[in-house]
Image (spheres, grey):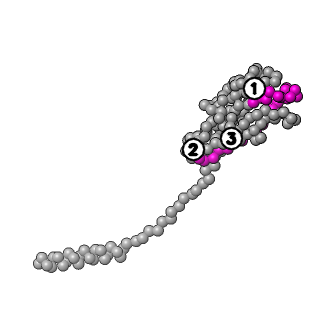
Amino acid sequence: MKKFFVICTTILLAGCFYASSLWAIDATLKAEATVKKGTIKVTSEEDLEFGEIIPKPSEKVQILVDASAGAATEATLKTGKATLKGNAHSGLVKVTSPIACELSITYSVGSQQVQESSNSNTLALTNANVEKYSTKSPLTVQANTETDIHIGGLLTIPNNLAANGFDQDYTGQITVGVDYN
């Protein structure tokens, strides 16, 4: 009887395995993803302003707007003698990134000078000094959160500024490059 029971159990189990394979199925699924461009966006900009400067004639003067630790709301005299007036402040670029990450920042001053309208007189504003007195790179940002990049610099008025270089407005261009680090 024991032999009969073992044989019946073996046949029954074999039948179960055989029967289960008759009703087994395979399912085929797709693997899908949508990949989007993680574009960094500029949400607003504000120019770097050194204000009104009245330098002592025939003396090299350097004016500093230091935004290395955040927004600067005034210019300070670094070297020379001058009176500073007006609304000096750091420049500002606000950016958003769809990704929480570090951003790389570069600063470039066109011809590394600021010129008056006739282009015959120039003031020095170098890439190195803009980088030194602006927001440091890399900059950690949160996803979809507006982040400030403050731009400062050290403007140099030469000691040999021509007579027609006074009572002029000087402008230059600073390019702020922002990319994923």
Q: Which residue is mark 1?
A: 61
Q: Which label lies toward us, 3 or 1?
A: 1
User: In terms of image quadrants, where is residue 108?
Assistant: top right
Q: Which residue is mark 3?
A: 107
Q: Horizontal and vertical percent for residue 132? A: 65, 35
State the SS at label 3.
Answer: strand
- Number of other residues with Cα within 10 Å of mark 3, as a class: few under 14, some 14 to 19, many 20 or more: many
Q: Which residue is mark 2?
A: 102
Q: Please tell me which residue lies in front, 43 or 59.
A: 59
Q: Amino acid at mark 2?
A: Glu
Q: Which label lies toward us, 3 or 2?
A: 3
Residue at 61% in and 50% down: 38
Residue at 63% in and 36% down: 135
**How far is the residue under mark 3 from the one under mark 2?**
17 Å
Q: Amino acid at mark 1?
A: Val
Q: Which label lies toward us, 1 or 2?
A: 1
Q: Which residues are magenta?
A: 156-181
